[in-house]
Image (cartoon, rainbow, N blue to C red):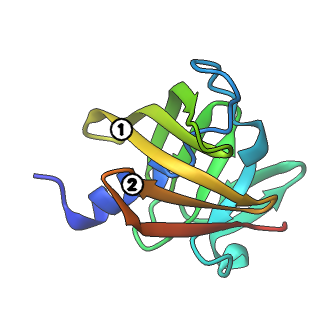
Amino acid sequence: MMTKTRRVAVVLAAVAGGFATAANAASLEALQGAWTMDGTGCDDTFEKVGSDIRFKDRTSTLTTGILVKGDKILGSNLSCTAEKVREEAEKGTYSVMLNCADALMFQTVSTTFKVTGPDSFQRFDPGFPDISFAYQRCKL
């Protein structure tokens, strides 16, 4: 049984599904970098080492931070790869299929998100569009 913390980590990692403009392109170019749910806590969550951004503590189960590097989406204790990306009819809204893994299990996760600005997006389930989670880019 997956703990609540583990489920939150899976959902957080699924957040950054991709900003590709074509199906299956799996390009996450617009999402490269570090993100947190409220845009705060960036300095507590991430550190910059040279030109690389890293989690300060990859074992933390409390962070809302995610890192997007290429087609990889990293949570504090989860790693996902964007496999398929589809832009929906509403411009700037994307659905993505992610293959995710943690230390114990693998799973396929799908999510939808809408770009709301150059440094922000919202993640939601299309079945429940009235429930969404906002993310802000960290400036490190």
How far from the left and from the top, in percent, is residue 15? Answer: 51, 52
Q: In the picture, which quadrant includes the C terminus?
A: bottom right
Q: Which residue is mark 1?
A: 109
Q: Which mark is on residue 11? A: 2
Question: Viewed as shown, does residue 76 lie left or right of 116?
Answer: left
Q: Residue at x 82, y 58 (%)?
A: 118
Question: Would you call the spot at circle 1 few (<14 residues within 10 Å), some (14-19), or many (20 or more)?
Answer: some
Which residue in the rendered view is the most extreme toward the top? 24
The residue lying toward the viewer, choosing from 62 and 121, is 121
Question: Viewed as shown, does residue 126 lie left or right of 7?
Answer: right
Image: 131 above or below 28: below
* Element carrying mark 2: helix
Which corner quadrant of the image does residue 62 belong to?
A: bottom left
How far from the left and from the top, in percent, is residue 123? Answer: 50, 57
* Element carrying mark 1: strand
For badge 1, the amino acid type reads: Val
How far from the left and from the top, in percent, is residue 61? Answer: 40, 67
Image: 12 above or below 134: above
Label 2 vs label 1: CA separation?
A: 8 Å
How many labels were placed on the picture? 2
For badge 2, the amino acid type reads: Val
Residue 58 visible in rendering? no
Residues at discs 2 and 1 in contact (Cβ within 8 Å): yes
Which corner quadrant of the image does residue 40 belong to?
A: bottom right
Question: Viewed as shown, does residue 107 lie left or right of 37?
Answer: left
Which residue in the rendered view is the most extreme toward the right? 50
For marks 2 and 1, the one nearer the N-term is 2
Question: Would you call the spot at circle 2 few (<14 residues within 10 Å), some (14-19), or many (20 or more)?
Answer: some
Q: Residue at x 45, y 67 (%)?
A: 132
Which corner quadrant of the image does residue 94 belong to?
A: top right
Residue 113 visible in rendering? yes
